[in-house]
Image (cartoon, coloured by chain):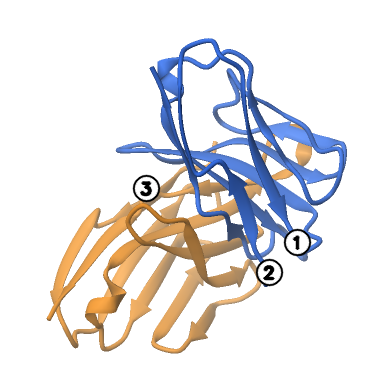
Amino acid sequence: KQEVTQIPAALSVPEGENLVLNCSFTDSAIYNLQWFRQDPGKGLTSLLLIQSSQREQTSGRLNASLDKSSGRSTLYIAASQPGDSATYLCAVSSWGQGGSEKLVFGKGTKLTVNP
Amino acid sequence: EAQVTQNPRYLITVTGKKLTVTCSQNMNHEYMSWYRQDPGLGLRQIYYSMNVEVTDKGDVPEGYKVSRKEKRNFPLILESPSPNQTSLYFCASSLPSTGIGEQYFGPGTRLTVT
């Protein structure tokens, strides 16, 4: 059974710092990995999607890497801003019952960027 | 505007009273899914659907039903709600390419069962 772990559970940094969020998964047979952002009481917003054949994806100040063989992904945020404060979740697509695909989520890292 | 809509956004009900939470997407997505989010447990998948008339159980399907009669709609049905189904519910959709594609989430439905 696929399990996704995110460390740390919470992170507080001063504005302007570069930071790394970690995600690990137990089964390397994945189709893709996605990083999401969730603001309090709101839905999830997709940030980056990395296909299993890719090593990384970039969007603005965000860079996500994937090492499928070791079961790890990182989300790098450059020059953090207070508006980056949110919970960041990673999810991997994996096989479900009946042979179809499903997403398995980590529990998230709550990021606070202090002005 | 491309979006996933859920209704209602907030619902307080009593044990045993059947309810339906609707989910609709306007992006012609094939894949749709329901999740519940609880403190300390994260997001857990309830049911998902790869296409019309194709549904599969997720990790926590007990006490829930779904149907996918048309591509745009994926309602979540609680036949006899119980207090342990008090949670924040999200619907999501995507257009599968290689594997499940980028997921678009609805705004959430906060359900309280007393």
The residue under label 3 is A107
Could you say where residue A54 lies in the image, as x and y percent from the top left?
Answer: 61, 76
Inter-mark Cα distance, 2 to 3: 27 Å
Q: Is any atom of residue A68 visible in this view?
A: no
The residue under label 1 is B26
Element at label 2: loop
Mark number, residue A104: none
Inter-mark Cα distance, 1 to 3: 29 Å
Which corner quadrant holds the N terminus of chain B? Answer: bottom right
- The residue located at (42%, 49%) in the rendering is A106
Q: Are marks 1 and 3 on the same chain?
A: no
Label 2: chain letter = B
Q: Colour of chain A?
A: orange
Circle 1/circle 2 CB separation < 8 Å: yes
In the picture, measured across the screen, residue B56 lies left or right of residue A78, that is right
Disc 3 marks which amino acid? Answer: Lys
Inter-mark Cα distance, 1 to 2: 6 Å
The residue under label 2 is B2
